[in-house]
Image: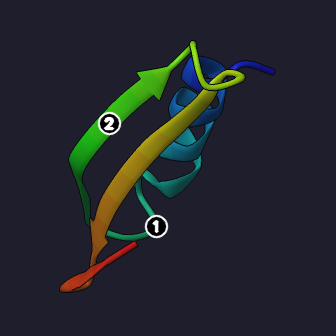
Amino acid sequence: MNFEEFRSDLEKNLKGRVSFEIQECHYHGYHFGSGLLVLRLSGYNF
């Protein structure tokens, strides 16, 4: 599973359960495929 698949699966699972907003999404392929995903759920950032 790559970062984009992880992000889309997470969005699909959260839809309908809670209201969320993607605050920030970055993929860093040059850092061993790591990424940054910041979500706002119920007023808190994760």
Question: Residue 21: which quarter of the image?
Answer: bottom left
First reached walking from the N terminus: tag 2 or tag 1: 1
Q: Horizontally, is 39 left or right of 9 in the view?
A: left
**Figure check: 44 above or below 32:** below
Residue type for callout 2? Cys
**Residue 5 % position (x, y):** 64, 21
Residue, far top: 29
Circle 1: residue type: Arg
Residue 41 point in image, percent of width and height: 31, 75
Callout 1: helix, strand or loop? Answer: loop
Q: In this view, does 12 lie above or below 29?
A: below
In the image, is 39 to the left or to the right of 34? left
Badge 2 marks a residue whose secondary structure is strand
Q: Which residue is drawn at 18% across and 86% down?
A: 43
Instruction: From the viewer's side, name the closer residue of 32 and 23.
Output: 32
| Of 31 and 46, the residue lying toward us | 31
- Quarter of the image containing the N terminus? top right
Residue occupying image coordinates x 55% and y 19%: 4
User: Dot 2 corresponds to which residue?
Assistant: 25
Q: Indicate whether 41 appears above or below 44.
A: above
Report the residue marked by disc 1. Answer: 17
How crowded pointer 2 is (Cα within 10 Å; few <14, some 14-19, many 20+) is rated as: few
| Picture coordinates of residue 2, whole percent (x, y) | 71, 19
Q: Residue furthest right?
A: 1
